[in-house]
Image (cartoon, helix red, strand yellow):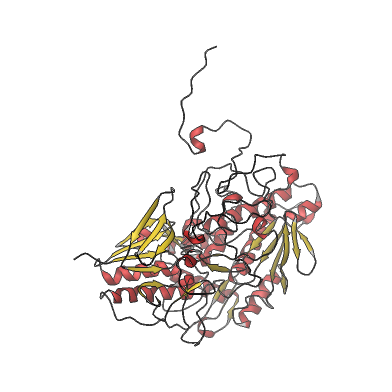
Amino acid sequence: MSRPRVVIVGAGFAGYRAARTLARLTRNRADITLLNPTDYFLYLPLLPQVAAGVLEARRVTVSLPGTLRGVRLVLGEADGVDLDERTVHYSDPEGGAGSLRYDRLVLAVGSVNKLLPVPGVAEHAHGFRGLPEALYLRDHVTRQVELAAAEDDPGRRAARCTFVVVGAGYTGTEVAAHLQMLTDRLVRRRPLPGGLRPRWLLLDVAPRVLPELDERLSRTADRVLRARGVDVRMGTSVKEATRDGVLLTDGEFVASRTLVWCVGVRPDPLVEAVGQPLERGRLIVDPQLQLPGRADVFACGDAAAVPDLERPGSFTPMTAQHAWRQGRVAGENVAGSLGLGRRRRPYRHRDLGFAVDLGGARAAANPLGVPLSGPAAGVVTRGYHLAALPGNRIRVAADWLLDAVLPRQGVQLGLVRSWSVPLDTASPELARVPGGPDRPSARTGGEPMTRESAPGTDPGRRTAAEPGKTEPAAEPGDNGPATEPGDNGPAGEPGKNQPGGEAAKRQPGGEPARHQPGGEPARNQPGEGPLRDQPGGESPRSRGGGGPPRPPPGGVPPRRDPPGPPTPRFARGGPPRARARRRP
């Protein structure tokens, strides 16, 4: 008799733990396949420290083949699910198509950036859901400070040193806290002309920072940020984004080259293509995480609207804490449905505390309901993260120690360019690469992965925008770390399948930055492809004039290398071609 086939889509907090639980319970009595765009799980709560240069990128990634014994990894992105045929269709990293048959299916595809109908945001803002975005943002912030140091015009210099973060949830608060410390360190090592200091703004329509948490944690975070000079503005958001800055809802125009969008997340677009009842974009499941009427299909994490048994009539929020624990229950219930594990049980969970890392030795935490701040909260927060990490604990601790005693390296690595991490992507864990496949996706109803073009946008990108969405506030699923002593379960941004889980798309396992060839034009540089000069791009005064024509739908802006020795043709993505030599 053949072994039952189990397919898990997504390796974020929910998918990773479901796979690990299933492998432990079935003990090679089932064929377990994990479909994910990357080969790692991304621990999203520490992603702001990657952007700030505290941790190296590989420290927050955990190898899937190395830690999930008895689980077969298939690299690819799910394009559609045929529930009647029990088949998952996917596209591999090189553009090929494939399918996986299953007897049991676990959908744990996670979430992506949530866009609001604010003019200019899709073109000019930077997201923060995956590893490529974090790596790009670190380079971008470092570059702006370095360009400001060489800028003669005081106005342009101040604009380059002004950074705007929208969304004061977990992600936005931690990004503002860590990157503000990074820019201060850069300026201390190389003072700017006129004694200029970097300026950080944190905006949100909510009445306070961290509106999802206890007010005592909110007050602690607000106090720490303001003491460092962050301009915290509640009840304020962005009305319009341009290449030169942002227009706020209170009428003020802030000249800036950097807009970081952290207003929340929405479920992965694949969920809509399943064709089952939804609750605000999430699949409705029963307390045992099964789709009603589909005993062979389970869903968990950000993809599922799970009834909250502690608060009847409501659903669990989109946080990594819930995703991690739902993954465990999903694994147990799948094994139970196959007769290979314990009896199935409903998902029930109580929050035992939260922790927000504010950089350095500062944090806000309330383990077991005890509010902490200052160094004590910092120790609890970092201790929790070490316990929750599925791997790399020694490396992470070593990086923390080195950062405390050695100066941080403020350098640009140039691994990820602006156009390769568009805000409206449905795959934040993957960086776009030159010549990448352009294929239709069942997630968007079978149509090519395009969106209505606003001026300066690529018609070939998949959209994450939600038509008709008007609420400017972050949803309480902005995923932040949650402290739950005794279960070693990560908490934090919902890992979209992550290994960002990339804080992601099927993964919040991650968002591996694909290291495309260097020298690609940044989306925000005038004269390169369509003009997409979002804040943070280089000033048009610092670049040359016209650029190549607009790329075809689904394409990537043509490569434009800086002056220098000609690049061999094989380095541009193709094999060398023989040429006839002309005789004199």
Work out whether 50 lies above or below 356: above
Look at the image and tell me whether residue 336 can be seen: yes
Work out whether 562 lies above or below 67: above
Answer left or right for 489 relative to 343.
right
| Residue 7 location, quadrant | bottom left
Residue visible at 55% across and 68% down in the picture: 266
Q: What percent of the width, then of the height, locates residue 399? A: 50, 60
Work out whether 408 lies above or below 583: below
- Residue furthest to the left in view is 1
Q: What percent of the width, then of the height, locates residue 104? A: 33, 69
Q: What percent of the width, then of the height, locates residue 468? A: 63, 68
Foreground residue, 8 or 322? 8
Answer left or right for 92 relative to 126.
left
Answer left or right for 51 relative to 145.
left
Q: What percent of the width, then of the height, locates residue 412? A: 60, 49
Which part of the image, by quadrant, shows the C terminus? Answer: top right
Please count the marks in the image. Answer: 0
Which part of the image, by quadrant, shows the N terminus? Answer: bottom left
Look at the image and tell me whether residue 407 can be seen: no
- Residue furthest to the top in view is 584
Work out whether 397 lies above or below 419: below
Foreground residue, 139 or 313? 313
